[in-house]
Amino acid sequence: MKSGLSKALVTGGAGFIGSHLVDTLVKEGCDVVVLDDLSAGSLSNLDHVKDKITFYKGDIQDQNILMKASENCDVIFHMAALVSVTKTVDNPVDSAFINDIGTLQVLESARQSKVKRVVLSSSSAVYGDDPFLPKHENMPPKPMSPYAVQKLTGELYARIYYDLYGLETVCLRYFNVYGPRQDPSSPYSGVISIFITRAVSKKPPVIYGDGKQYRDFVFVKDVVKANLLAAIADGAAGQIFNIGTGKNVSINSLWDMTCLLSGLNIKPEYAPPRSGDILESVASIEQAKSALGFEPDYLFEKGLEITFKWYKDSRK
Ligand code: UD2
């Protein structure tokens, strides 16, 4: 698909998802500006496009730098955030400055710079442990961490900016995103990045609980596609969309598939379930399909294979 965007700002563009979006925008010939404080993202994610983008190292709480970075942009993709749920639990106030005030500053800069649309990255975390499946956008949110409250607050501000100021905002609730460049280094990193790293070093993974819990894993390139559609779709403004695949994969079968890809036969170790772990999560993507024309391109097997190859090659 071609989005036809001429200039875009990506906050958090040096991060895992942001850098993939930057790649696609650059390929499309879009003039790309990245604002990232490099607290979680890395310049190595942008090394191959560094001559083709404008990069600002800075904080989304800094209105001056945001105004400069958003000048003449058609759209802002707001991806910068403190994404670790545990860090927001440990630092509820500091994280609110980044995730709430930062988001508010992004919206305010967009309003002042007369940017047409802002696409905000939200999270399935806003659903909490509501057992209703699949999760759909009209369910009452049930945030269970400062992170989830902060994401929900961002969505509410986005709605208010649309209603009060006519700034077109679109919020995307990502389910479990995976793919190349996801950082596997913390025990709370995405399970796919952890499992593949274990497989590449021929070590068993730890499965918390019985491994029958499942998630809706969505490949990062499909998340990029959803962002581009959200930036251009008529009638999407003021709305919230789940971004997943509508399919689920259990943690046990994730390890089985990882073993198949790596030619290993290693039995996982089992440990007690993580406290607060949600058992089942799967998205309804009907609204994204009908309003954005979103359809994931990557079957799970394909996305996992690409991701596995990337971790294997980057280890060399
Ligand atoms: C996701 C988000 C998290 C938060 C949460 C809200 C990611 C990476 N994490 O957590 O930030 O938004 O949703 O609902 O997107 N597991 C293992 N072994 C491991 C690591 C994980 O068994 O070494 C299990 C874990 O207990 C869980 C499942 O794998 O049942 C998925 O874990 P996760 O941390 O990748 O994602 P999730 O959905 O718990």
Image: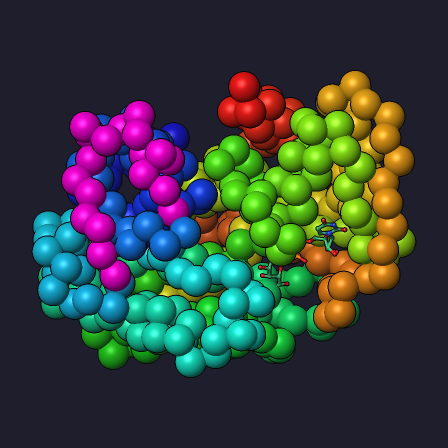
Residue beneath the point at 20% across and 35% down: 53
Q: Is residue 211 left or right of residue 83?
A: right
Residue 296 position in % (x across, y down): 56, 38
Which image quadrant is residue 178 in? Answer: top right
On the image, which quarter does residue 15 sit in?
A: top left
Q: Nearer the viewer, residue 226 or 38?
A: 38
Give the percent coordinates (x, y) of residue 175: 59, 53
Q: Tell me if residue 279 can be seen.
A: yes
User: Picture coordinates of residue 101 (x, y %)?
Assistant: 31, 74
Q: Which residues are magenta?
A: 41-59
Q: Nearer the viewer, residue 148 or 169?
A: 148
Q: Is residue 108 above or below residue 23?
A: below
Residue at left 65%, top 34%? 197
Q: Which residue is depicted at the point 30% across and 69% down?
A: 102
The image quarter containing residue 267 is top right
- 54 falls in the magenta region: yes
Along the line of sight, which residue is nearer the eye, 40 or 179? 40
Indicate whether 54 appears above or below 61.
above
Q: Specify the quadrant that holds the N terminus.
A: top left
Which residue is located at x 71 percent, y 45 percent?
A: 247
| 286 on left or right of 273 | left
Answer with the quadrant where ligand 1 appears in the image.
bottom right
Q: Is residue 151 left or right of residue 268?
A: left
**Residue 228 appears in the figure:** no
Q: Is residue 35 magenta?
A: no
The C terminus sits in image quarter:
top right
Q: Position of residue 55 (x, y in %)?
A: 20, 43
